[in-house]
Amino acid sequence: MLTIRQAHAKRVKQRSITIAVISTIAAIALVYFLVPLAPGWPAVKKSFFNAEIFIKTFPTLLDAFMLDVMIFLWCAPLIAILGLIIALCRDVRSPALYPLRLFGAIYTDVLRGIPVVLIVYLIGFGVPGLGLSRPWNSPYIWGSLALILTYSAYVAEIFRSGIESVHSSQRAAAESLGLSPSDTMRFVVLPQAIRRVVPANMNMFIALQKDVALLSFIGPVEVLRQAGVYKSLYANFTPYVAAAVIFLIITIPATRFADHLMSKQQRERS
Amino acid sequence: MLLKSSLSIATVCVGLLLSTSSAFAADSCATGKTLKDGVLTIATGNPSYFPWVLDNDPKAGKGFEAAVAYEVATRMGFDKDNVEWTTASFDASIQPGEKNFDFNLQQFSITEDREKVVDFSVPYYSAAMAVLTRKPIQEKGAKPELESLKGLLWGASSATTGVPMLNKLIKPDDKPLLYNDNNDVVAAMKANQIDAALFDLPTAMYLGAVVLDDGVVLGQFPADRSENPDQFGLLMTEGNPLKNCVDEALEAMKEDGTLASIEAEWLQQTTSVPLIK
């Protein structure tokens, strides 16, 4: 038997669910019926949502996407390690090691300030142009390095914010217990700092998953490039839509997972 | 005798009449169908390259495509002052919708699939595909033979029909690398990331002679070897009413040899590159 208050709460909840469902359906219906009324719709449909071309190109695109996944898999751990090192450089407190601090600051400023695609171009064509021999001039190596440099700058800032979020009283307490500065960092600060910034770093890796496609600018035929080849071949943009769908298959679950981690953390803190 | 000569005079007269009337038809066939009244707007790439357009200045009428464009314009009844130039990228040109040009020429290969989205004129040039490489690769033993070409590391510009040709005809052992445009392909050649690349012959010759220090055009595919040699057409919006007028002008240029002499003037060096066996 519900109390009056519970019954009321239930009614309110049901009512708001009904309203939400109706307004969602109305919004979808509006888009579904209004967009095809646009004068250019048949042309757009033919060149962006062509089922025949979608089916024809999808398997090859999925295959090409495996290259994206591989590049991501070898870049991600290196980014995490380099990002952490840069963050630690920026947290150095001894005056003698000030150059490290300066290096960390310049590194993050410069690499966050340049568009990724420019770094990919400059390093991907520039360094091998110095006269390296194969296989050391491979675009895979230098393109990956470009991604690692850029993303480690962002990740370093995230780690730094995590390190700074650990209250300084904890460092003082560790010091009074006789821990050396490096042990303090290792056993007291970093375990808390890293845990706190996991959701923020998840977001970076979702962004990285998409930016891997920029490596196609210097040669590798991954999903974006393969879609571009099909676009030219069929004079149709549907392969790009197919590539977008493939990206979403990976990024939507990853984004949901990051959001889940973030809200879980918020609940734990409050 | 007298009858015969007067007959031939009559034939000439009829011929003259016909040709003046067709010239008149050419004059009027574009009226009211251009983007701007009385002005023909022609698009090309930016930058546009030798030998298609010299010095990136199509207005000068120098270079193969600039010369063809002005000849077509003249035959459609526009004098030089009534021709305006604009630029358009590849992507913008094949998108559905309005365009900022009456026709566009920047070595667009005519393909069946592209034809579903835009209109092409009759072809104004048939390009053989050629292999561009560098001297060190040639010295290492690369020959203009299919077997030898298979072993090279290939690159190509992704938007060209060279890509399917590479995969169908050469079938290289290693997966080719693809780039946004010809400049990037050349950058990769300079960085020794690829051995060779496919371009149409005039582009290959320009890049080999001017852009690469040690460039060599290794060979060209005979027209019968490449299933369908690239044919370049003037690109127009789908259903452009000017198409008939443009085609008429091009056909007339082919018939009286003007097109061939423009080609000879601007693209004559073709025979110095060996055929690929």
Image: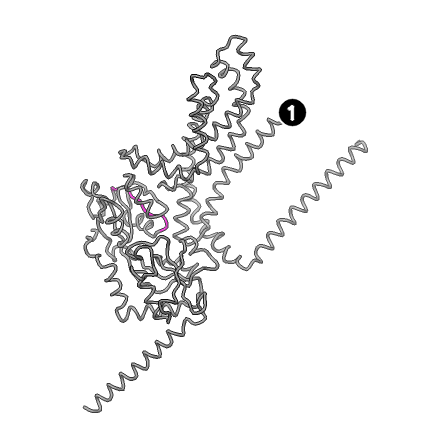
Q: In the figure, residue B35 lies in which quadrant?
A: bottom left
Tell me the magenta residue range. Answer: B151-159
Label 1 crowding class (10 Å Cα cut-off): few <14, some 14-19, many 20+?
few
User: Which quadrant is the C terminus of chain A positioned in?
Assistant: top right
Q: Residue furthest right?
A: A4
Q: Relative to A190, is A66 above or below?
A: below
Q: In the figure, residue B261 lies in which quadrant?
A: bottom left
The residue nearer to you, when weighing A52 against B121, is: B121
Per the image, label 1 sits on a secondary structure element best described as loop
Residue at 53%, 36% (x, y): give it: A253
Type of amino acid under label 1: Ser
- Tell me residue B178's x, y (percent): 35, 44
Name the residue carrying label 1: A270
The count of marks equals 1
Q: Relative to B168, is A118 above or below?
A: above
- Tell me residue A153's x, y (percent): 45, 30
Magenta stretch holds residue B15? no
Q: Is residue A188 left or right of B271 when viewed as pictured?
A: right
- Tell me residue B235's x, y (percent): 39, 61
